[in-house]
Amino acid sequence: MQYSTRFDANKKVWFGPSSDFKIDKQTNFGDILLENLNDTDAERVIQINGDTGETLTKAEVRKRTIRCAQNLIRLGCKQNDCISIISRNHHNLTPLLYAAICIGSPVSPLDVVTVKDGISLILQRVRPTFIFCDSDVLQTIKETTTDIGLNTKLFTVNGSLNGFDSIDSLMVETGTEDSFVCAKIADACLQTAVISCSSGSTGLPKSICMSHALFLNMFSNRISQFPFISLSFSSLYWLSGIWASISPAFKNTRIFTTKPFSAELFYELVVKHKIQFFFGPPCQMQAFLKSEQCAKADLSSLLACFIIGGFIPSVLVQTLKKFHPKCSMLTGYGMTEIGGGASCTAPNELEEYPNSVGRLVPGAKMKIISEKTGEKCGIGKEGEIYVKIPVPAIGYYKDETATRSAYDSEGYFISGDLGYFDESGRLIVVGRKKEIFKNCGFSIWPAELEDLIIKSPAIKEASVVSVYDDEAVTDLPAALVVKQDNCSITENEVYAIIADQLPSYKHLDGGVYFVDELPMTPSGKVIRYKVQKMAQKFYQQRKCGL
């Protein structure tokens, strides 16, 4: 699908096509989900477990959704009670997500990878009434809730444990399924459906509230209603995982897996299930295009790969086109803070314009603000991207100060990204103004790593930045370290400080480099972009064996 972007030279604002979406403020998004699940083709399979082959039809998902909603209410779940999900993908998470939306209970998904990584901060913030988690992390979650004084009911998702109910117990017959109605909501623009995690500009994770109206708008878009057989390795923790779980209620058939991404598993699922649409980050695309199976596997079913969450090297586009010419690589510009995408490329656009993230989607607006002058920029002029979409996220959960500071006086979200528009209305993103970066889609907050490193008595100063690895197609954490006088510490010992305490994606795989001093401003602040240039140079030298 190709959009057009219009530039108003007087206002210096770019506009996407007009949107015909009309908000009915009393509409519960759950009503739309149940309505779609109750129309024609009730026996059509809409979800397949790629690990086991188990399937769910539209009718089965609808039945489980209603039963789950009714059983949650029976257990005392009230409108606005938060439900947290800390689990890998599972069949019953889809009806659980739908059920929570139906009864007006916000869902706060977390990833099992983050369990030992600041999860208490988020649980303490959202205070969930119910938590659904995998059995292998349940004990850790139980200890965490006890530590923060959170009285919550825990359910297992992928199996059963003595003393804990399973998610399956909520799918049992109630006898009153035919009389179920969704909760009434006062304002779809203010009623939270999902609370997603994001890094925030300060480096600490914030929780972003996404409304019923946001999802009503998202799934009114025609691109969300194409009859694709789709594959994504994302869990509900990611907005892409939320989209993948909701889309089967419309036209898609979703293939999911509980296993982590690998090139071998990707090929196996694509070939077995005739996948047509793949959704994932550049590092996953790089892995399967560089694998031995790339030139051999029958990927004739694959029509499009939508790649988000990082820069896409032109070699990826070229390699895909070489081996699978009928498959288009697509990308776009968006973020959790605004509740989704603001631009999208057309099929085959990346072949001619490899740095493009496309043109604006219907209803989106953007302006580019000069870092030097604070004025609006024109065509071809680089500045910070300010973005506005028809139905934005509500804001940061219980943090009005952060919400207000994230937007300008005209209601545009201040992205922290740098870019410009070309003469054809394509948005080109050139880099991040923010300090936060991502390793294979996982956000990394430098201050968190620095705080741990600097605790060593042998270390005077430390600055953590990203270095780009063109083989892995992702940013890796690296540290520049200044030793204390007359103290000794090795690179391996610094690496172990992080490796022993944080998840693998935060390990200093970009390297540890000792320097005499860090570049500083006159006021004593680290000049991060200079640190990053130094780290990138050191990393490239190390890779070349210098």
Image: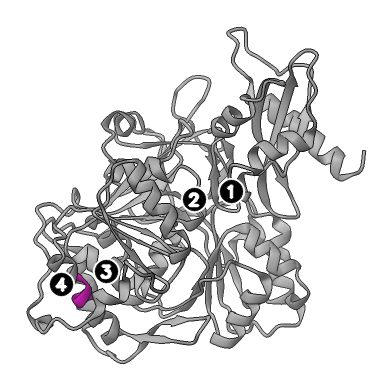
The magenta segment: 65-69
Quick one: quadrant of the C terminus?
top right
Residues at discs 1 and 4 in contact (Cβ within 8 Å): no
The residue that label 2 is drawn on is 114
- Mark 3 surroundings: few (<14), some (14-19) or many (≥20) residues within 10 A: many
On the question of residue 322 being in view, the answer is yes
Which one is closest to the eye, mark 2 or mark 3? 2
Mark nearer the N terminus (4 vs 2)? 4
Which one is closest to the eye, mark 3 or mark 1? 1
Q: Label 4 vs label 2: CA separation?
A: 30 Å
The amino acid pointed to by label 1 is Pro
In the image, residue 66 lies in the stretch drawn in magenta? yes
The amino acid pointed to by label 3 is Tyr
The amino acid pointed to by label 4 is Gln
Which one is closest to the eye, mark 3 or mark 4? 4
Say the numbered circle drawn on residue 503. Answer: 1
345 left or right of 495? left
Q: Residue at x 29, y 80 (%)?
A: 61
Mark nearer the N terminus (1 vs 4)? 4
Q: Percent position (x, y) of residue 126?
A: 29, 45
Say the numbered circle drawn on residue 70. Answer: 4
The residue that label 3 is drawn on is 98
Residues at discs 1 and 2 in contact (Cβ within 8 Å): yes
Q: Label 3 vs label 1: CA separation?
A: 30 Å
**Does 165 appear above or below 392?**
below
Residues at discs 3 and 4 in contact (Cβ within 8 Å): no
Question: In what element is the residue under mark 4?
Answer: helix
340 left or right of 130? right
The amino acid pointed to by label 2 is Thr
